[in-house]
Image: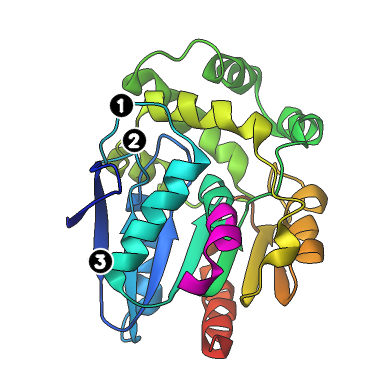
Amino acid sequence: MPTLKAADNTELHFTSIGEGRPIVFLHAGLGWDSSYLIRSFSPMFEGDHHRLVFLDVRGNGRSSYAGELSFELFSSDLLSLCELLDERVVLFGHSYGGTIAQVFATQHPERLAGLILDSTFPAFDFLPQALERIQAKATAEQMQTFGLLFGEIENDADYAAAITGLLPLYFHDEPDGWVAEFTDEVLFRADAFRKGSALLGEFNTLEQLGDINVPTWIAGGASDIYPLEPTAVRLNNLIPNSKLDVFEKSGHFPFVEESEKYRSQLMKFLGEVG
């Protein structure tokens, strides 16, 4: 796995697959890594002329850092990666990765050829609606785990167990074995989850999204526990030159649940990016 030095000399790990125009992928979590994106997207690009670059966000996966996290640091790290790649990139952000992608797109649009925002949001102000959706699907045990996740998870093993128990809620119809594979391959970081979650209360790009001037594709699942109106629909309404695709039989991972349709729409967007 290649590494790069961030502006403050933090060592960041990334995976690079293929040759051609770079697509930089930012994973969800925080507290996860890029492995689930590698497994999902590598098959979509077999025989295609793109370079897929999967970054483990600072403090996550195999990227080091023990200090406090911030969106300014995340954006600076992405700038270092873009400078290393030395050409404009298509930037993909899934969930929390999409929040980082939005910040970067408003600060460094000259570095982007396109932007893809998947299952993400411009402000974390929809928790009551999300809780209603969670309560409608969750078992009593899952609700208890959800409560513990934001208060009493102290180590990586407990965090991994909590995510394993809760991930089925994020699907319209969970594919057989997907959560087990996810748990086996992801390097969980409870500290990164706590620090990343603490940043969401103040995260808000609502006033900056109108300044994004690159082609943007927004994807959302109709069965996501994050409701579409304050997330994907609001992004689409605020970002000029954006297109929204709603995946009716998907939750938080439309590229998993409707992979063929997703690939078709993704390739259509990439073909239109100048």
Q: Is residue 132 magenta?
A: no
* Cα–Cα gap, marks 2 and 3: 19 Å
Circle 2/circle 1 CB separation < 8 Å: yes
User: Which residue lies at the image location 80% right of the left edge and 29% below the top edge?
Assistant: 128
- Front one among 52 and 259: 52
Q: Residues within 10 Å of mark 1 (few under 14, many from 20)?
A: few
Q: Residues within 10 Å of mark 3 (few under 14, many from 20)?
A: some
Placement of 161 over or under 206, stated as above or below: above
Q: Residue furthest front?
A: 7
Q: Residues within 10 Å of mark 2 (few under 14, many from 20)?
A: many
Report the residue marked by disc 2: 59
User: Which residue lies at the image location 51% right of the left edge and 73% below the top edge?
Assistant: 110
Which element is circle 2 on? Answer: loop
User: Which residue lies at the image location 24% right of the left edge and 50% below the top edge?
Assistant: 13
Report the residue marked by disc 3: 16
User: Which residue lies at the image location 37% right of the left edge and 45% below the top edge?
Assistant: 57
Q: Which mark is residue 66?
A: 1
* Cα–Cα gap, marks 2 and 1: 7 Å
Q: Is residue 36 left or right of residue 228?
A: left
- Front one among 20 and 85: 85
Q: Is residue 130 left or right of residue 118?
A: right
Amino acid of disc 1: Ala
